[in-house]
Amino acid sequence: MVSQYKVGDHVKYHAIGGAGSGADTSTSTGEIVDIKTQTESAGNSGNVAKASEEEPRYVIKNDNTQKETAYKAGNILGLAD
């Protein structure tokens, strides 16, 4: 599977919940710094991303906090302005 986004993309995303969590969930912006395609540690949070070729995890560095966390493609709303 080809990744929908690439390293260096500046994106808008749901930091909590995901695509189905509703319009009242806050959004954040950040830069994709890595794309994981296998289960491994991701970002600087110490969490393990359960990623695969079919369901990659995008490591996003938050613009405000500088924290790096892995997200599913469903959390990403699209490219940020």
Image (cartoon, rainbow, N blue to C red):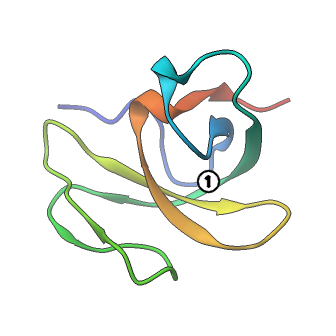
Up/down of 3 relative to 35, above or below: above
Side (left or right) of 5 relative to 24: left
Q: Residue at x 74, y 21 (%)?
A: 24
Tag 1: residue type? Answer: Gly
Q: Quadrant of the N terminus?
A: top left
Q: Is residue 15 above or below residue 61?
A: above
The residue lying at 69 percent from left, 15 percent from top is 23
For the point 50% across and 34% down, the residue is 75
Position of 42 with respect to 37 (left or right) is right
Q: Which residue is mark 1?
A: 8
Between 44 and 17, the one lying in front of the other is 17
Q: In the image, what residue occupies the spot 27% across and 46% down?
A: 56
Q: Nearer the viewer, residue 44 or 26?
A: 26
Residue 25 pos. (x, y %): 69, 30
Could you tell me residue 59's position as x and y percent? 48, 60
Q: Secondary structure at mark 1?
A: loop
Name the image quarter holding residue 68: bottom right
Q: Quadrant of the C terminus?
A: top right
> Residue 35, located in which quarter of the rendered image?
bottom left
